[in-house]
Image: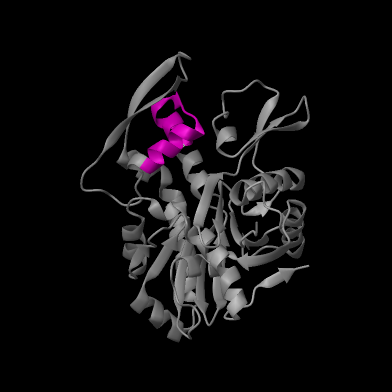
Amino acid sequence: MAVSDIGIDLGTSSILVYVKGKGVVLKEPSIVAYDRDANRVKAIGEEARLMLGRTPGNITAVRPIQRGVISDYLVAEQMLRYFIQKATGRLSFRKPRVSICVPSRITEVERRAASDAAYQAGAREVSLVEEPIAAAIGAGLDISRPNGNMIVDIGGGITSVSILSINGIVVSHTIDIGGDDFDEAIVRYVKNQYGLMIGEQAAEEIKITIGTAFERPDKVTMDVNGRDLVTGLPKTVKVSSEDTREALKDLFAQLVEAVHSVLERTPPELAADVVDRGIVMVGGGALMGGLEELIEAKTGVNAIAAQDPMLAVAIGTGTCAEILERGDYILEDEE
């Protein structure tokens, strides 16, 4: 049976796989549970995530993707192989053609590592797609025309802010802030404010459920379980949406500053287009409540999340392979 082209959003916190003709078929955490005693991978993806904080000391959680690039080549290769086989089926006889999304600031060494890992994982051909291009295409923006489009991609480890026009990146700025940093900030705040130690999963639940970047007219709360730092015993506290805004305000200030920086360096003609078209946000961080209002209040430019912000980069990466066949946009093939 033939194997369709696939696109991989190789994220710091999640990996998404797009299969031609099927759409996004897989979304799992980019986590590997590694058994140090046996020197082998114990679990990958969602199965590994469920092990976090619940395993013996010899099993550690490894994130082979850090800030959008491969930090542990051997583990990343095994993880890629697992996801490619899971997405295409183990009985496929033909190796797939793979497009991988990479940050625009990636070095040549990092590009080669991503390409080599995909080949070792079973790819027939590998093409690398710059993240802002993939994000814009996945969000449904027409970047082929001489018009300015602004895309803000808030991933798990990095946030990239870019101006695109005529299938290229005109201005771009990347900061090392993402959804994982939001979780860590919430963990620190709850620890300092309530004397309660919580885990990453609890922090993520707080972020998703009541997190906000802008002051809400109605304050919402939720109960959070953790360990009391004084007694060492389990304890439950009530955390509010205002707590999350306070915990994340410094990170959001840096994000807004990155948007400001790109707008200041944008050519006037393209800047006028951005004012008319607005700022499009993708990535899991785009789902943060109040973020659209915060960016609009600080920049004066309308901001809106894409229809499927978490899937946009994966869709764009996979779609790029189809665009390549038509010759509308040239990807960089890795031999």
The residue closer to the viewer here, 162 or 9, is 9
Range of residues picked out in magenta: 187-208
Please give the name of the residue rendered at 62% of the width and 63% of the height, measured from the top-left corner.
5
Q: Residue furthest left?
A: 217
Is residue 152 within the magenta segment? no
Q: How many marks?
A: 0
Image vertical order of residue 306 relative to residue 331, above or below: above
Q: Nearer the viewer, residue 334 or 270?
A: 334
> How far across and how far down the image is residue 194, in percent?
39, 27
Where does the image place residue 181, in percent across and percent down from the top left? 52, 45
Q: Position of residue 142 (x, y in %)?
A: 45, 77
Position of residue 27 relative to residue 331, above or below, is: above
Q: Nearer the viewer, residue 143 or 154?
A: 143
Q: Quadrant of residue 329?
A: bottom right
Res 320 → quadrant: bottom right
Q: Is residue 27 left or right of residue 98?
A: left
| Residue at x 57%, y 33% (from the top left corner) | 47
The answer to whether residue 265 is visible is: no
Main SS of the magenta part reads helix
Direction from residue 73 to residue 144 in the image, left or right: left
Quadrant showing the C terminus: bottom right
Residue 119: where, in percent of width, then height? 75, 57
| Position of the N terminus by quadrant | bottom right
Q: Is residue 118 visible?
A: yes
Which residue is found at the position 35% from the left and 64% from the top?
Answer: 304
Q: Residue at x 52, y 65 (%)?
A: 316
